[in-house]
Image: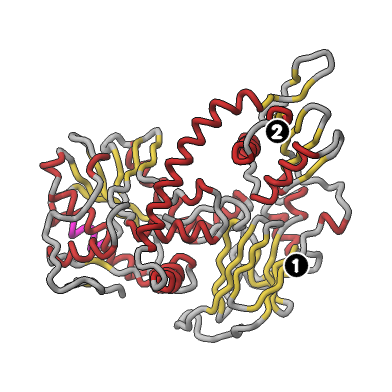
Amino acid sequence: MSRNKTQTRPAGMLANETITAGSLPLDAQMLKPGMRIAVGLSGGADSVALLRALAARSAELGLVVHAAHLHHGLRGEEADGDLAFARNLAATLGLTFHQARVDVAREAQADAVSSKAAETLEEAARRVRYAWFRQLLATGELDAVATAHSLDDQAETVLAKFLRGAWTEGLAGIAPKLEFPEGMILRPLLSTTRAEVEAYLAGLGQSWREDSSNRHLTFTRNRIRHELLPLLTGWNPRLREHLAQMAVLAADEEAWWDGELARVAPQILLPGRAVRGGGRASGGDAALAIDFTRLASLAPALQRRLLRHAAGKLGSAPDFEATEALRDLALTGRAGQKLELAKGLRAERTPRELRLEVGPVSLSRSATEAAPGEYKSCIPCKINAPEFGLEIAVDIAPASEHNPGQGIAAGATVTLRNWKPGDRVRLRYSSGPRKVKEVLERLKVTGSSRSLWPVLEHDGRILWMQGVELESVPGVAITAGPSSDSPMQVSD
């Protein structure tokens, strides 16, 4: 069961420092008089503080405040307690309360089958949460939903994305505002620290809920929060503030680049293919070209931006190495030279332009080129496998009544590789082992996708397979997400 907890003073706060009710710092500029706004109320300290602060200032700001709680179908009785706490708090404040339940684990599994890609519980939870927010906005009862992301959340997100090799857009972290056709998602606490939040609640005598999963170090964000950031803060006590400032700088620079690309790209990017006698043949949405003579006259920073922008219009997102390979081909390549990159992005140098297109992964490569390599590592580990577009984290799982043993010990070797004929897996709730080939047939995975389908193996046993839920293995926790060599969502 989770604990309702009231803090008297956060660690590091001096005894003579006081935070009184109504003094929680928040960005009120995004809150307009007459706005009907629901706070995404998890029951945690941040969301409770935001709800209390907006409710206290609703008359002053001209707001109609609601509360909204989504039960994720995880953590059993603890999550039931969160729902009851949120409902009672809304009732105490006299606020309209919205609630819904969803089975995040089932949603993650269903999405993995339909999209043929692995999705972590964190990613699935965020996806369904924001989908629900948009459903609430679509009813017309609300103009906006406010989430309680703090400066600490922003710092953790920026650091996580930096560690994954994000470009500038990733370093922008959590956006202060998201606009959807149905309405807006606002983050009024992005400049407010967690210490300020807890001190504010202490001044009110307001309790909150603690999510026990926030202490599990199997989750990357928790390791950053509880291990890495405290360590780095020893080097720079203002690190969290500086990371949050980096997000502001990156967001502003991205906004400038968007305008610059809108101005320059139409002069450089050419639709379809050039045809003899002049003019261009339509290539639909799967092909375009770049005038490399004009490209060469631009600064390297703009060259990279244009190449990534062009690839993005084709649904691809090349990493740094791939972008540099495209630059080299455009600026120093020879006519007829070709390049094939991840996920079907192809480039060809002609006498006048660099042509880009996307299509199925080529099956004409040699056997050595076609088969991805094997990635071996020792538990605990994180395996970045750009050939699969995946990053797999394998950690030691804490013992529990559902996971009593340590079936695989720390230091054991695991291998991420492509599936091969004869491989068998034990599906959860299945009566016996199944051939991977049969599982892929059931998933309707065919063609090039089927030829590149990753599994994680230890000592002959497949522990994890993309797109399906396998029988759990005592002693290990496995999470999967996009490769750090490609843009990656961090739960925010």
Q: In this view, does 343 lie above or below 270?
A: below
Please tell me whether mark 1 sits on a helix, a strand or a loop.
Answer: loop
When asked about the image quadrant of residue 459, the answer is bottom right
Q: Main secondary structure of the magenta part?
A: helix
Query: From where the camera sits, is residue 289 visible?
Result: no
Looking at the image, is mark 1 or mark 2 earlier in the sequence? 2
Residue at image location 55% in from the left, 49% down from the top: 167
Amino acid of disc 2: Ala
Query: From where the camera sits, is residue 217 visible?
Result: yes
75 vs 382, nearest the viewer? 382
Residue 53: x %, y % from top left: 18, 52
Q: Is residue 84 magenta?
A: yes
Residue highlighted by disc 1: 374
Q: Locate the C terminus and report the quarter of the image it occupies.
A: bottom left
86 vs 204, nearest the viewer? 204
Residue 324: x %, y % from top left: 70, 46
Please tell me whether mark 2 sits on a helix, a strand or a loop.
Answer: helix
* Residue 39, disc: none
Residue at image location 75% in from the left, 37% down from the top: 331
Q: In this view, does 37 lie above or below 367?
A: above
* Residue 296, disc: 2
Amino acid of disc 1: Glu
Frontmost of labels 1 and 2 is 2
Q: How is the image coloured?
A: secondary structure
The span shown in magenta is 83-89
In this picture, residue 331 sits left or right of residue 241: right
Residue at image location 74% in from the left, 39% down from the top: 359
Q: In this view, does 355 lie above or below 135?
A: above
